[in-house]
Image (spheres, rainbow, N blue to C red):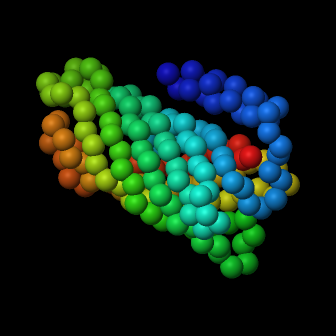
Amino acid sequence: MRKALFATAMLLFVSLAQLSAQSLGSNYKTALGVKFGDGGAITLKHFVKPNAAVEGIGYFWRYGTRITGLYEFHGDINGAQGLKWYAGPGAHIGFWNTKWKDRYGYNYSGSYAGIDGVLGLDYKFKGAPFNMSLDWQPSWNFGNGPDTWYGFYAGWGGLAIRYTF
C-alpha cells in the first residue's frame, strides 16, 4: 500500500511539474505531496489568505483510512526566511479495516469522527518548488468503536514533503 501511495504521489509530482509554473520564491499558494507519520498520507495545502491556509489530508495506515481537514493560521519566524509556524483547528472522519478487528477482537461499525488541532513548522525552499512541514495533530475522537478510539489521541502528525505551485 505504501509503495502504491509513493508511486501515485511521484506521478502527481511529475504531472504538476509539466503543467504549472514553478514557485521558486520563499512563498507559495498551493502545495501537493506526501506525509509520513502514523502511516502514509496525501496532503494538499492551499493558502486562502497570506497568513491562512486550508489543508486536506488523506491518511492510509495499517488499520484503515482517515480524512482530515484543517484551517491553519501561519506566521513568520523572524530571521528565518521561508520558515513559518502554524496552528489551527480541524475535523476528521476515519474508517478502520478488518485488520483492527482481527488483531484486537473488536466487532464495531468501523468508523469514527472527531475534532483536531494542529501545531507545526512549514519551510519553503527558496529557488526550488518544494516545501516541507513538521507538525503535531492531536485529536478528540467520537463514534462507535473500540475504547481506545474515544477521547483524546495524540498520535497524529508527521513530516510532509510537497511540490509547490
**Residue 80, image x, y percentages:** 72, 72
- Relative to 51, say whether 65 is above or below: above
Asked if one can make out residue 104 in the rendered structure from this viewpoint, the answer is: yes
Quadrant of residue 163 in the image?
top right
Q: Is residue 73 left or right of residue 131?
A: left
Left or right of 163, for residue 118 = left
Identity of the residue furthest to the front in this view: 48
| Residue 50: image location, x then y, percent | 65, 66
Residues 109 and 3: in front is 109
Q: Is residue 113 above or below residue 12?
A: below
Query: Which residue is at a point 69% across and 54% down the rendered structure image?
Result: 29
- On the image, the x and y values in percent for residue 100 come to 26, 27
Residue found at x 78% / y 47%? 129
Looking at the picture, tell me which residue is in the foreground, 163 or 161.
163
23 on left or right of 83: right
Q: Is residue 148 visible?
A: no
In terms of image quadrants, where is residue 25? bottom right
Residue at (82% x, 46% y) in the render: 22
Query: Could you tell me which residue is drawn at 57 percent across and 21 percent down?
Result: 4
